[in-house]
């Protein structure tokens, strides 16, 4: 049961972080170059939700016995 909760929490984090990262991609056509974009992504805490979510999902899938 706990593995399913970890999986769903990771999915929520991955969706939230991925959505924010894609939203910040709209700044590139507005004049931001790629180096500035990656610096911006690195400084935003909400963009770290995506890799944390992927780690949660991977951990839950590895630990599931079914």
Image: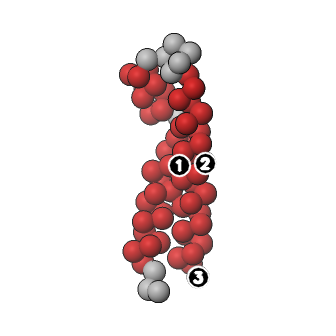
- Residue at the spot of label 1: 49
Q: Quadrant of residue 35?
A: top left
- Marks 1 and 2, Cα distance to the nearest angstrom? 7 Å
**Residue 8, which numbered label?**
none
Mark found first going from the N terminus, 1 or 2? 2
Q: CA distance from mark 1 to mark 3?
A: 23 Å
Please rate how many residues cluster around mark 1, counting C-alpha atoms within 10 Å: few if below 14, some from 14 to 19, many from 20. Answer: many
Q: Is residue 57 left or right of residue 12?
A: left
In x, y percent, where is residue 47? Answer: 52, 41
Q: CA distance from mark 2 to mark 3?
A: 23 Å
Q: Residue at x 56, y 60 (%)?
A: 11
Q: Position of residue 25 (x, y in %)?
A: 53, 29
Report whether residue 45 is seen.
Answer: no
Q: Which residue is outermost to the front?
A: 29
Q: Determine whether, in the image, residue 61 is placed left or right of residue 29.
A: left
Give the image quarter of residue 55. Answer: bottom left
Residue 16 shows which numbered tag?
Answer: 2
The 10 Å Cα crowd at callout 2, few under 14, some 14 to 19, many 20 or more, is: some
Q: Earlier in the sequence, mark 2 or mark 3?
A: 3
Residue depicted at x 42% and y 28%: 38
Q: Which residue is mark 3?
A: 1
Q: Earlier in the sequence, mark 1 or mark 3?
A: 3
Q: Secondary structure at mark 3?
A: loop
Q: Are marks 1 and 2 in contact (CB under 8 Å)?
A: yes
């Amino acid at each position: 049961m706990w593995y399913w909760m970890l999986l769903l929490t990771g999915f929520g984090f991955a969706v939230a972080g991925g959505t924010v990262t894609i939203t910040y991609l709209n700044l590139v056509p507005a004049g931001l170059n790629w180096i500035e974009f990656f610096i911006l992504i690195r400084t935003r805490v909400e963009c770290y939700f995506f890799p944390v979510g992927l780690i949660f999902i991977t951990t839950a899938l590895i630990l599931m016995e079914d």
